Each structure stands twice: as C-alpha cells, then as structure tokens.
Amino acid sequence: MAWKLEDLADSEFACECGRVHKVPIKRIRMGEGALDYIAKDMAELGLTGTPLIVADETTYDIAGSKVEQIIQEIGVSPRKVILRPHHNLKPSSWVLPNEQSLGEVLLRLPDKGPLIAVGSGTINDITRFIASKTNRSFLSVATAASMDGYASTVAPLLTGSFKRTYPAGSPIAIYAEPNILATAPLEMAGAGFGDLLGKSIALADWRLSHIINDEYYCPTIAAVVEDVLAAALADVNALAVGNPDALLRLTEGLVLSGVAILMFGDSRPVSGAEHELAHFWEIKGLAHGRLFYHGDKVAIGTLFMTRLYENVLALEPASIDWARVYAQRPSLDTYQQVVQQDFGKAWDEVHSPSWETTKQAELKRPTGELLYGKWDRIQHIVPKSLLTAEEIVAHLAKLGIPKTPAKLGIQKEWLMASIRSGKEMKPHRYTILDLADEMGCLDAVIEQYC
Ligand SMILES: [Zn+2]
Ligand SMILES: [Zn+2]
C-alpha cells in the first residue's frame, strides 16, 4: 500500500484539492508487539487517571488481559468491564451497542482516566460514545478485521430495535497485532473484506456526483480508498486461509478507510449506495430479530449496485425521451406513500423536517440537461473502481461470504424495497440509486434482479 498508516497518524497536510486534511489520531500501531506501546503512549499523550478496559468475554481473553498486564507493569491498576449479551435477537452471543451495555460501562467508569476499547465494531462504538459524552480519550485495540469503524467518529447505537448513528469522536490511538486478529473467527475477516469491497461503489458514486453535480472531490483521498480496495483484492487467497499478515493488512485497510473519513470530514469517500442498502436491511433485520455482520450486507449491496451500474452505464441519455421520463415521475405524495410503506415503522426515524422540500426539488431535477455533454466522461471515469458482478461472486465464494440476499436472511420484499427506497437512508448523498431513479430505470432493475 502506498500509504503508510503509521505515518498518517497525527498528520496535517495542504492537499492539491485546495483543502487541508487532518488526521487527529495520535498513534496508529500495527504489527507484532503493537500492544506493548500502550503504556508508553498513554504516558506520552498525557493520559492520567484510572484506565477502563471495555471488552466482552472473548476479546478480554484474547487481548484484554494482555492490555491489563501491560498497564499494570507501569504501576497503574486499570478497571475493566466485561460486556455480556442481554437480548432476544439472533445470534444470541453477540454483545449489542444498546442501553444495557452503555449503562454497564457508565457504572464502572472511574472519576478520571481514558477508556480502552478491546474488540471490534460494537465494543468500539460503545466506548467511543461514552468517551465522547464524558469528554475522555479512548484507545482502540482491534481484535478482528471485521469492519471499517475503528477510526470512525460516529457511533451507531441501538435504541429498541432501531439503530441510530450518534456523533462521537475518533480514538486517540489504534493498535492491532496479527496474531490477535488471527484468533477471531474467519467469517469476521470475510465481513471486513465485504466492507472494503463496498469502496468500489462508494468511489464510483462519489465520482458520479462530482461529474453530474459538481460535488467536491479530492483525488488524494480517492487514491487512498482506491489503494485500500486494491490491496484487499490482492489478498483474497491469503485471507481465505486466515493468513495473519493478510489479516493485518486487511485491518490496516479498514483503519485507513476510516482515516479517509477523517480527512474528508464525512463518510462520502467510503460509503455509497451499497451502504444505504446494507443499512436498510439492517433496520429490517432488527425489526425481525435478526443480526448480521455489517460487511456481509455491504458485500451483497455491492453486488447489486454493481449490476445497477452495468445497467445504467449501458444507457444512452442522448436517445432517451426525457419529456416522457419527467412526466412519469411520481408526485411527492405518491412517492412519500411508497417510501413510508417500504420503511415501515422506521420511517419516523429517517424522515427529517426538510425532507419534503428537498424531495420536491429532486423530483423536478432536469437530469437530461445535467447529463448533457458529460456522459462520455461518466462512462470513462466512473467505472474505474468497479468490478464485474462475476468477480464479486467469485471473491465472496472464496471467502465464504453469503452470495445471495436469501442466504443472509434478506427477504425478497426487503430487497425490492431497498432498491426502491434505500436512497432515503442518506437523502443528501447522491448515488447510482438516485441517477437510476432519475433516468426512470429503477423499476425495470427491480424486476430483473429481485
Ligand atoms: Zn484533498
Ligand atoms: Zn461499512
């Protein structure tokens, strides 16, 4: 990978895009012996008080106890909280980022001192949220190459059966050791790979919107994300057998993907239509008592959005009867009824006060004019990061990731609803779902693929 992750920590640079990019994470340590730096880093970063280690039973065994020992060796006694699952969802062994887990961490919180998340997505999200709310720093010890949220600044938390994303802060330091990552179930690395596979769509969506809507675009950040994707693809065979070095590289890619978010300011460079679908299915799954790996859903979302790109890029806007396309667009009321039905109870959570106004304008977008003179550029630039659907299926098969929505428990109705209304997960982010809808071809695609 051209970008050395350790060097990006605590960096700031004036970019060719005209902005200054900043990475506020002070230390990123990846490799054998990385955890040994924790005590030294805490001292250097001025983190005093009693550290609180947040883990679950498994992550405490594989890494938490080691962190505890390293801190004890410098004469500091850390506290710890071992989170356990308390819910009726399946799989029942997963700890959830819900009120119960947050409460358990709060109850153990010392008066002063940093938090140390030892785990993957959920443990980090819980810790990130509490650290942010109590104005503390937190360190992140990665235990699985399962998702790209290690460097994240937001915490998706569960209230009831709805997952809402709350603002929080990135960790002050991130650590990962290959042999710890290799103890996690292989399916977790499959999910991590799936999350990175989604970058192919995220980059395409970003470039698409840059060309059509003149949205701000940074070639440097795009290159970072492109490198991350290429490195993961080059490692498929090694990941399939759980090679520890490949798992470390995958984790580096996942952290780097989070660093791209920090440099950009939001998740635009790494999250497009594939994540909108994944989040939509997550909502549906939760309402039906089912949990899935985030990255598995992103992988399936990537597969479907790759097919959608294939369909849309094969169109010829110059020969489209735009007057007819505009006339066939639904009224705001009709559109809202469909979306509301597709989201069900979750609609209230997604619906924002400005939604009607924004939507009204979107339904009137002169897409034919906006595309005028740009189609060659779109066809040339946008597919650069895309894979073929066949390539994706082959990768998923190698890594043992579910290859069809059904295998992941995604019902046919959810799939259809997600392609129809999934873009409302993030209405302001322009993706291939928006363009396909504006070109009037979304229904045909739903019919063809669902
Ligand atoms: Zn830039
Ligand atoms: Zn993701």
Image (tube, rainbow, N blue to C red):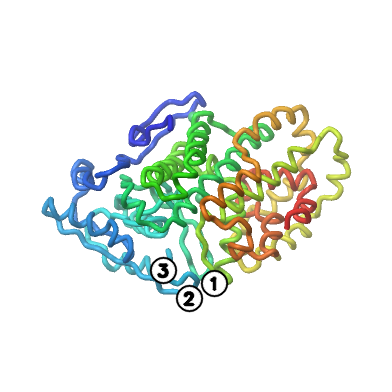
- Assess whether mark 2 and mark 1 are in contact (beta carbons under 8 angstroms): yes
Image check: 411 left or right of 322? left
341 relative to 390, above or below: below
Would residue 98 be visible to someone looking at this image? yes
Residue type, numbered disc 1: Gly
Residue found farthest to the top: 16
Reading the image, the residue beneath label 2 is: 88
Mark 3 or 1, closer to the camera: 1
Quarter of the C terminus within the rendering: bottom right
Secondary structure under the numbered disc 3 in the rendered image: helix
Which badge, 3 or 2, comes first in the chain's sequence?
A: 2
Image check: 417 left or right of 180? right
Tell me what residue is drawn at x 49 percent, y 44 percent: 236
Tell me the crowding category of disc 2: few under 14, some 14 to 19, or many 20 or more residues within 10 angstroms, Cα based: few
Q: CA distance from mark 1 to mark 2?
A: 7 Å
Image check: 318 left or right of 236? right
Residue type, numbered disc 2: Asn
Query: Could you tell me residue 188's position as x and y percent?
Result: 45, 56
